[in-house]
Image (cartoon, rainbow, N blue to C red):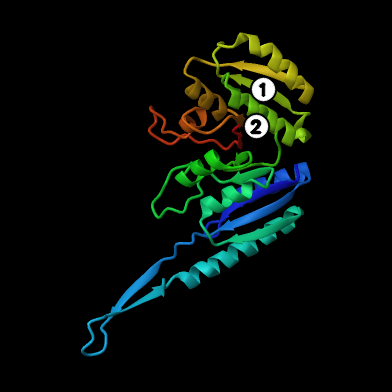
């Protein structure tokens, strides 16, 4: 891997996302490019002024919002903070300041990158959205490279690779993409969470054989018939693991962020999640 993108909202820099992105850059000896995203749509004030006496036309003045200066100052502060975090991490990095349409531009940039790192809470909506936001969901579906949802916290090491296998083409593709990009993790223990509930027994031997070419050890984790709940309950007990999933959509990752039917709270985890679609 050579190029990692990090998506950052200019108004809300997540230091944990930066920290995890720099960890991946050091691990893979990759260059890190931070894209500071700023929505093109500005807050504007429309002022109506009466025209000259006898004129039937009013004068319409459009003035930039009064907080534009404050937003610019916040943007500059976050860029300075990013530079300082990068300096401490000691990784090669560059900054791209985007002033277009964030979703469209980050998807376009992802086509020329090996990996995109994003915080699940990244949003350009004025109202609160639980993770993953509509913006992040769109990126997961349209990105031109694999995406990593950064963890809420990270203490600096990966112990296990958790492959989520549901028998789909997408889950196998994600396994391959992760292994090709992160060959530095081949010494870690690979665990396959069998979400197919035994529907594809003939695949287990072949998958195990393939994984052993890339990792020193492999273990299969059986789950209950309710795959989404089983996965979530399993991951809640984990720490310092890297989760690998197939394409985002109506499947496991979508249900993972839904509200828990018993607790009524949004499911969440501090583990990084790798998502790739074919």
Above or below, comparing residue 132 to residue 76 in the picture = above
- Residue 75 position, x and y percent, is 56, 64
The one of 126 and 111 positioned closer to us in this rendering: 111
Looking at the rendering, in which quadrant would you find the C terminus? top right
Residue reaching furthest top?
A: 202
Residue, disc 1: 191
What's the CA distance linking mark 2 and mark 1?
10 Å
**Horizontal side, residue 40 vs residue 274: left or right:** left
**Residue 215: in sight, yes or no?**
no
Q: Count of labels shown? A: 2
**Horizontal side, residue 115 vs residue 130: left or right:** right
Q: Residue at x 71, y 45 (%)?
A: 23
Sequence-first tag of 2 and 1:
1
Residue, disc 2: 241
The local secondary structure at tag 2 comes to strand
The one of 278 and 214 positioned closer to us in this rendering: 278
Q: Residue at x 71, y 43 (%)?
A: 24
The one of 20 and 72 positioned closer to us in this rendering: 72
The quadrant in which residue 83 appears is: bottom right
- Residue 122 position, x and y percent, is 51, 49
Q: Are marks 2 and 1 in contact (CB under 8 Å)?
A: yes
Q: Residue at x 52, y 50 (%)?
A: 103
**Residue 26: in sight, yes or no?**
yes
- Residue 167 position, x and y percent, is 58, 18
Q: Residues within 10 Å of mark 2 (few under 14, many from 20)?
A: many
The quadrant in which residue 265 appears is: top left
- Residue 77 position, x and y percent, is 59, 66
Above or below, comparing residue 53 to residue 22 in the picture = below
Residue reaching furthest bottom?
A: 53
């Amino acid at each position: 891997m050579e190029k990692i993108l990090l998506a950052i909202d200019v108004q809300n820099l997540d230091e944990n996302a930066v920290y995890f992105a720099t960890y991946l850059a050091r691990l893979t000896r990759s260059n890190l490019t931070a894209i500071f995203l700023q929505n093109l749509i500005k807050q504007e004030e429309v002022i109506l002024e009466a025209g000259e006496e006898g004129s039937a036309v009013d004068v319409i003045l459009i003035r930039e919002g009064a907080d534009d200066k404050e937003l610019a100052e916040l943007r500059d502060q976050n860029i300075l903070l990013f530079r300082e975090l990068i300096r401490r991490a000691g990784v090669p990095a560059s900054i791209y300041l985007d002033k277009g349409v964030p979703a469209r531009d980050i998807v376009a940039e992802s086509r020329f990158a090996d990996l995109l790192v994003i915080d699940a809470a990244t949003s350009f909506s004025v109202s609160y959205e639980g993770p993953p936001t509509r913006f992040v969901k769109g990126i997961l579906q349209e990105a031109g490279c694999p995406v990593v949802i950064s963890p809420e916290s990270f203490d600096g090491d990966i112990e296990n690779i958790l492959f989520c296998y549901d028998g789909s083409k997408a889950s196998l593709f994600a396994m391959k993409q992760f292994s090709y990009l992160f060959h530095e993790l081949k010494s870690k223990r690979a665990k396959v969470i069998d979400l197919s509930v035994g529907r594809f027994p003939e695949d287990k031997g072949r998958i195990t054989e393939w994984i052993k070419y890339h990792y020193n050890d492999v273990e299969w984790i059986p789950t209950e018939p309710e795959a989404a709940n089983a996965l979530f309950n399993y991951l809640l007990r984990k720490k310092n693991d890297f989760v690998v999933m197939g394409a985002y959509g109506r499947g496991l990752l979508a249900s993972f962020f839904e509200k828990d039917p018993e607790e009524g709270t949004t499911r969440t985890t501090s583990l990084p999640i790798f998502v790739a679609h074919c």
